[in-house]
Image (cartoon, helix red, strand yellow):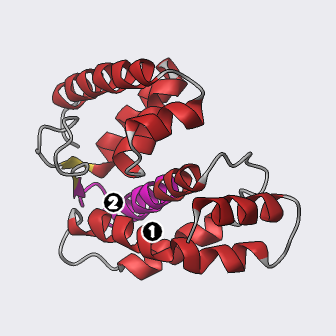
Amino acid sequence: MKDSTVHDLLVAWRSGSAGALEALAPLVAGELRRIAGSYMRRERQDHTLQPTALVNEAFLRLAGDRDIDWESRSHFIAIAANHMRRILVDHARDRKAAKRGGGQTPATLLEGHAITDGQQVDILMLNEALDRLGKMDPRKLRAVEMRYFGGMQHQEIATVLGVHLKTVQNDLKVAAAWMRSELAATPPP
C-alpha cells in the first residue's frame, strides 16, 4: 500500500477518526511483525511474548499517541518499534524484579549495525545507556531509535528530523561510538 495512504490514515487518526487506526493496522502489520520477530530472535529462548503479542501491545500503546505529528509511514514504524523496545524493557524489569536481582535479558541491535559490535548486552543496560544518550542529545537518541529499532534508512531519518543527511550520518556514528563506550564501561548487573 502506498505511503501516502498510511500518512492520510495517520492524519485522520490524529484528527479524531475512530476507524483510522483500525484501517491502518493491516497496512503496517507485516512490517511490524518483521521487526517484532527480529527483536524476539534476540531474546531468551523461553520468553513468554510472541512477535504478534508484541505488535498488539505496541498498538495498544500507540492508541495513546494520537497527538504525534506523524511525518510518514517510516516515522510511524519507528515510533512503533520504539514502543516494542520499551515493552521488552518493561518485561525484562518485571522478570528481574520477580527473580530478585537475576534474570539478565541479553539483547543485540539489528545485525550489521555497530553499536554493540555483535555482542549481546543486557536489555536493561542498553535501555539505561539509551536514556543517558537521550538526556545528553535527544536528536541522536531519535536517530538511533529510528535506525536501529525502526529500521529506517538515513535519508528517511533526515526527513523526519528535518536535518541534512550528513548530520544523520554523523549523529549515528557518534552515538554508536558513545554507546559502545558506555556499554563497555557499565558492569553487568
Name the residue type under label 1.
Answer: Leu
Q: Position of residue 153 (x, y in %)?
A: 38, 42
Q: Residues within 10 Å of mark 1 (few under 14, many from 20)?
A: many
Q: CA separation, marks 1 and 2?
A: 26 Å
Residue 84 visible in the snapshot: yes
Q: Between residues 12 and 96, which one lies in front from this camera angle?
A: 12
Span colored in magenta: 82-106
Residue in the picture at 79% in, 79% down: 19
Residue in the picture at 54% in, 22% down: 163
Residue 49 visible in the snapshot: no
Q: Position of residue 146 (x, y in %)?
A: 45, 43
Judge left or right: residue 77 versus residue 108: right
Give residue 1's quadrant in the image.
Answer: bottom right
Find disc 1 in the rendering and name its residue: 32
Q: Residues within 10 Å of mark 2 (few under 14, many from 20)?
A: some
Give residue 48's quadrant in the image.
Answer: bottom left
Find disc 2 in the rendering and name its residue: 96
Quarter placement of the C terminus:
top left
Q: Position of residue 101 (x, y in %)?
A: 28, 54
Q: Position of residue 166 (x, y in %)?
A: 39, 19
Local secondary structure at mark 2: helix
